[in-house]
Amino acid sequence: QGIACRRGRLCQEFSMSRIDQRFALLQQQGRKALIPFVTAGDPDLATTLPLMHGLVAAGADIIELGVPFSDPMADGPIIQRASERALANGVTLTNVLELVRQFRTTDQQTPVVLMGYANPVEAMGYEAFAKAAVAAGVDGLLTVDTPPEEADAMVACLKQYNIAPIFLLAPTTPEARIAKVGEMAQGYVYYVSLRGVTGAANLDMSEVAARLPLIRQHVKLPIGVGFGIRDGATARAVGEIADAVVIGSRLVQEIEAAGSAGAVTRVSALVQ
């Protein structure tokens, strides 16, 4: 394909990943992971770095950092606008990797997962991306429009460089695809709790609770639940049945309302 990882390279030896370490620690402590999402470059690149540190100080266990994309079809209007603001600021995948590198100069512990769409990664090339990402300190990649049936080349490259390939599952995912994800994924799996886009209506907790046992039959990794989580009460309810709570649109709303001057304070307060 021209984008597949070259075979035959000697793999570098790695210790247990940051993501695995974090979930192991949380399990020891009897806690669930809090995973906030923000879009890199929103409201601007200069604010995103202190936002990331603010998230950690407020209690984030893993950070999902959105890579802005011009056609974010899985996202509702809130995160769409965040991508538009970041793209208007000229933010590229290369800028996002540099942002992670800067974050790593003072934080070597918090896992960072890049979340976005396949096009920017494919444009860079899987191996070039994987090498640059591991050098920057990226721990995982979730491309929401890459089905597991088409992910072999990408996953091979990511695993070679110790970057966790993370996949989405949805209420409509058939059991065979759940099993496929269970074979390919590393780090954790992200269960989309709603039929719809990010920022959609409130989730039905009973439906989520009924779905997770089937997923756990095939997926031995931690399961994070996202979409529709907007406050502490909902997050606590999700934490009762899942291994991680993912919150995105509600945080991005705070950034949109606050702008550069107040984004860190407002987002940190909500995460706390």
Image: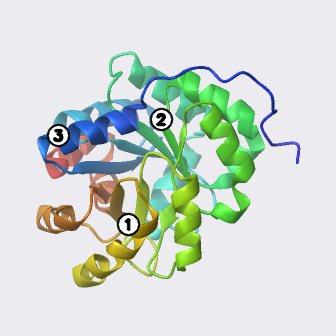
Dot 1 amino acid type: Arg
- Against 118, residue 57 (above or below) is above
- Against 127, residue 117 (above or below) is below
Q: Is residue 261 visible?
A: no
Dot 3 amino acid type: Gln
- Specify which label sits upstream in the sequence, 1 or 3: 3
Q: Nearer the viewer, residue 133 or 160?
A: 160
Q: Nearer the viewer, residue 127 or 242?
A: 242
Q: CA distance from mark 3 to mark 2?
A: 21 Å
- Specify which label sits upstream in the sequence, 1 or 2: 2
Disc assigned to residue 216:
1
Left or right position of 175 against 158: left
Q: What residue is rendered at 69% in x and 47% in y? A: 154
Residue 269 screen position, x and y as percent: 14, 46
Q: What residue is rendered at 34% in x and 58% in y? A: 224
Residue 48 screen position, x and y as percent: 39, 36
Q: CA distance from mark 1 to mark 2?
A: 23 Å
Q: Is residue 205 visible?
A: yes
Disc assigned to residue 28:
3
Q: Nearer the viewer, residue 10 or 189?
A: 10
**Mark 1 residue crowding within 10 angstroms, few (<14) / some (14–19) / many (20+):** some
Residue 168 screen position, x and y as percent: 50, 63
In the displayed image of the protein, which residue is found farthest to the front?
A: 217
Residue highlighted by disc 2: 139
